[in-house]
Amino acid sequence: MIVKDYEIKSNIEIAKNIFELKLIGDFKKNVFQAGKFLHLKCSENIHPLLRRPMSICDIADNETELTILYRVEGAGTQLISEKKPGDFINMLAPLGVAYDLNVKGNEQIFLVGGGIGVPPLYYLAKELKAKGAKIKSFLGFRNKEESFYTKEFAQLGDLVIASVDGSIGHQGFVTDTLTLDFDYLYSCGPTAMFNTLQKIIPEEKNAYITMEERMGCGVGACLACVCKTNPKYFPNKNYLRACKEGPVFKLHELQL
Ligand SMILES: Cc1cc2nc3c(=O)[nH]c(=O)nc-3n(C[C@H](O)[C@H](O)[C@H](O)COP(=O)(O)OP(=O)(O)OC[C@H]3O[C@@H](n4cnc5c(N)ncnc54)[C@H](O)[C@@H]3O)c2cc1C
Ligand code: FES
């Protein structure tokens, strides 16, 4: 685990309230693995006291550039959005468990992302494609204005887009368009989307969710991020910590 100040290369708004932040550093892919998360300090001051968790969206430029996509929600992300190239941001990382990338090649992978849950799936998609897997992405947004990285995902394989108001792609939820002909499915987004996935995907299928619970410490100590387990899979453990045992879980392991 590394705690370090990283220089900001760029920090630009790419869609309504969605920012792309690029950091300069030494980001070895075998350390900063897809699925793990970063804990960012939002300012030099004591407020906000807690770090903010963010996913790794991409690692590029010979492992010297790390991309984070974030939506401005409140005070912390607002402060991050005000940072300029050349400024520094303190990061505790990488945290949590990574996605299981144990595909042999040629498997059909489905990626299901909702809103600001989309970013970690981009890095995952690139890693899986490099191993020979076939990627089909299902991305859901509130509307066209808030949609992002659609061209980037389209370059990696098939792409289905949905939006609540129909201003981009299929009108409705991204789960409306889902089929079951996948070998592995990875999802990140709102809990309501995971609830639907739990209803439509049989337990024997290889399906994973990425929990973006509110967090405190990020390292397993405060229990702010606990998720209720499904007793069928964890008869002796009622809760798991999203920051330590997660954020990636098997779809049916949790009660949402
Ligand atoms: C493992 C993990 C990965 C994440 N990856 C990303 C990412 O790549 N990009 C991104 O934009 N966000 C991501 N998030 C969510 C992000 O951490 C929160 O949006 C952020 O902490 C909000 O901080 P804030 O100070 O701006 O807002 P706050 O003032 O803390 O909150 C503002 C509003 O946002 C809501 N909120 C805060 N945290 C969360 C959360 N975790 N989930 C849902 N709602 C929340 C609050 O309930 C409140 O309504 C991730 C969260 C986790 C746990
Ligand atoms: S955030 Fe503290 S235990 Fe998970």
Image: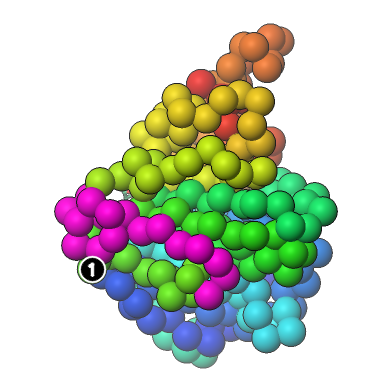
The stretch drawn in magenta includes residue 197: no
In the image, which residues are magenta? 155-171
* Of residues 113 and 25, the one drawn nearer to the viewer in this rendering: 113
Q: Assess disc 1: are there few (<14), some (14-19) or many (≥20) residues with their C-alpha within 10 Å of its C-alpha.
A: some
Res 2 visible: no
Which amino acid type is shown beneath numbered disc 1?
Glu
Q: Secondary structure at mark 1?
A: helix
Above or below residue 212? Residue 17 is below
Q: Position of residue 155 (x, y in %)?
A: 53, 75
150 horizontally vs 99: left or right: left
Residue at coordinates 53% horizontally, 38% vertically from top-left?
A: 180
**Location of residue 253 with respect to 222 vertically, above or below:** above
Say how many tags the image has: 1
Tell whether 195 sits left or right of 211: left
Q: Position of residue 246 (x, y in %)?
A: 64, 39
Q: Considering the image in quadrants, where does the N terminus appear?
A: bottom right
Q: Residue furthest bottom?
A: 86
Q: Residue at the location (66% across, 43% down)?
A: 183
Is residue 35 toward the left or the right of residue 193 in the image?
A: right
Q: Percent from the top left, x then y, of residue 254? A: 56, 25
Which of the 4 quarters of the picture holds residue 135? bottom right
Disc 1 marks which residue?
Answer: 145
Along the viewing direction, whichever of 246 and 46 lies nearer the viewer: 246
**In the image, is residue 169 part of the stretch drawn in magenta?**
yes
- The x, y position of residue 256, in whole percent, is 46, 25
